[in-house]
Amino acid sequence: MDQLETLRYPIGRFTPPPKITPELRANWIREIEEAPQRLRDAVNGLTEEQLRTPYRPGGWTVRQLVHHIPDSHMNAYIRFKLSLTEDVPTIKPYDEAAWAELADTDTVPLETSLDLLNAIHTRWVALLKSMGSDEFRRSYRHPEHGGRVFPLEEVLGLYAWHGRHHIAHITSLRERNGW
């Protein structure tokens, strides 16, 4: 992996495993449950200047990452609920890069997004823990991926990875810069 790829994907890219077991799903749910505290820990003590630092050349700032994670996970939570209540719904994509540039990302305190992530994950984890194997096989269609159908158990793994991925952007930046 080249240097830019390592900065972009500090934990590697998400690759769904060939077989998703109940134990693997339980591990992913635990990771989603722990993500809000892990994100709080990752940004604890950072200065405003550090929060405005991109995690890589041309990348989002730490501040943008912190606001992006609940934006993304809110969409994921809604997609789970749609998939559990509709037959293979087509989800609504959103332009995450454009969302990261909106004014609230620059003006709203990080604590608001940290609290939002905690609230979303509290509800999402309760839902996830209530789901059985048949429910995890329910799915949605994603129009930006050629109409590919994504089973919820794969999406669960993707979002467990997503939280770790962005938290690693912050922790690896802190490590590189000696923060």
Image: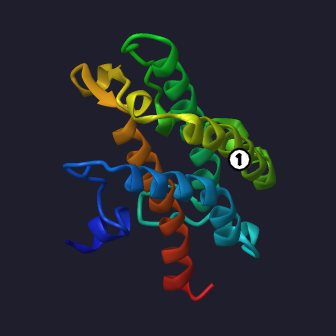
Residue 66 visible in the shown view: yes
Q: Residues within 10 Å of mark 1 (few under 14, many from 20)?
A: some
Please provide percent x and percent y for residue 108.
78, 45
Find residue 124 and report its image quarter. top right
Please provide percent x and percent y for residue 101.
58, 40
Task: Please state which of residues 166 and 22 is positioned toward the viewer in this rendering.
Answer: 22
Q: Assign a secondary structure to mark 1.
A: helix
Query: Height in image: 84 above or below 168?
Result: above
Quadrant of the drawing holding the C terminus: bottom right
Residue 50 visible in the shown view: no
Name the kind of residue labelled 1 in the image. Answer: Asp
What is the number of callouts on the image?
1
User: With 119 as the anchor, is 152 left or right in this view?
Assistant: left
Q: Residue at horizontal 50%, vertical 26%?
A: 79
Find residue 133 and report its image quarter. top left
Colour scheme of the rendered structure: rainbow
User: With 148 as the anchor, is 28 left or right in this view?
Assistant: right
Please provide percent x and percent y for residue 138.
38, 24
Q: Residue at horizontal 33%, vertical 23%?
A: 142
Q: Residue at horizontal 56%, vertical 32%?
A: 77
Please provide percent x and percent y for residue 73.
56, 40
Quadrant of the drawing holding the N terminus: bottom left
Residue at the extreme bottom: 178
User: With 109 as the anchor, is 15 left or right in this view?
Assistant: left
Query: Height in image: 147 above or below 100?
Result: above
Task: Please state which of residues 133 and 12 is positioned toward the viewer in this rendering.
Answer: 133
- Residue that carries the numbered disc 1 in the rendered image: 106
User: With 25 as the anchor, is 47 left or right in this view?
Assistant: right
Q: Residue at horizontal 25%, vertical 19%?
A: 147
Task: Please state which of residues 65 and 114 is positioned toward the viewer in this rendering.
Answer: 114
Query: Height in image: 90 above or below 40?
Result: above
Find residue 47 and report its image quarter. bottom right
